[in-house]
Amino acid sequence: MSSPVGRPPSPPTLVVPYDGHYYDEGSMEYKAWRQSALRPSVIAELERFVANRITGRGRAKHVHTAEGSYNIVFQFQFSARSDVALRIPKLGHTPAAIVAKKVLNEVAWMKFLKARTRIPIPCVHDHSKRADDHVPPLKLPFILMDCIQGQNLRTFLRLLGKPGEDAANDSKRTTIYEQIATFYLQLHRLPLEAIGSI
């Protein structure tokens, strides 16, 4: 591989090229699945599932659904306690062959970080423990955890305006960045002997 005169050759990278076709196919699969997942009969079954998995709180009522890049989150409310989130990997966005292992790995990391850092990690009440341990109507693995109320950080920072325009907003921005830096320092100091899953 030749490089322009005077420049050293570029080092090899581990970047995986974006596969638009694969992503589009996954998005179409997810959209079809999402329509069936949000049917009232499925939501009612999810309410029963959550109430059975977290006992002693009474009936679970579905109050909200949100989506991230790789998960769909169903929020449920109990009459006397805080809300819980049922987090399920998006069908079509996570390869089916690794979806159960992905959930187990995420739970392991959440428990590890909760035990060894001061980073606010939601309590995990239940999760898929085997490949066949699924949310019944959706047939996908799950994490059932406390729902942490808050705002989207990117949106909140935009609402603060540009730095230097308002002293109170600058103070809020500084506090946020200090908290994030503290989280990074805690992660950096964790004694990990190897890379990969826990």
Image (cartoon, rainbow, N blue to C red):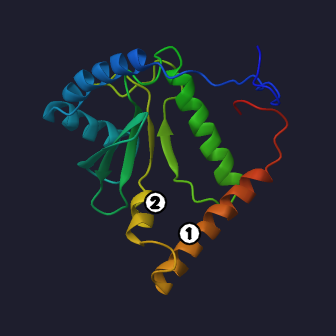
- Amino acid type at image mark 1: Ile
Residues at marks 1 and 2 touching, judged by CB atoms closer than 8 Å: yes
Quarter in which the C terminus is drawn: top right
Relative to residue 91, is residue 156 depicted above or below?
below
Instruction: Residue at 74%, 58% (x, y): give it.
Output: 185
What residue appears at the point 63 percent right and 46 percent down from the top-left corner? Answer: 111
Say whether residue 29 is left or right of residue 174: left
Which disc, if any, is residue 142?
none
Mark 2: which secondary structure?
Answer: helix
Left or right: residue 131 versus residue 59 is right
Kindly state the secondary structure of the residue where label 1 is placed: helix
Q: Is residue 100 visible?
A: yes
Question: From where the camera sits, is residue 55 visible?
Answer: no
Q: Is residue 48 above or below residue 24?
A: below
Q: Looking at the rendering, which quadrant does residue 92 occupy?
A: top left
Left-right relation of 167 to 12: left
The disc, 1 or 2, on the residue closer to the chain's N-terminal end is: 2
Q: Which residue is mark 2?
A: 153
- Count every numbered label the image shows and give the total: 2
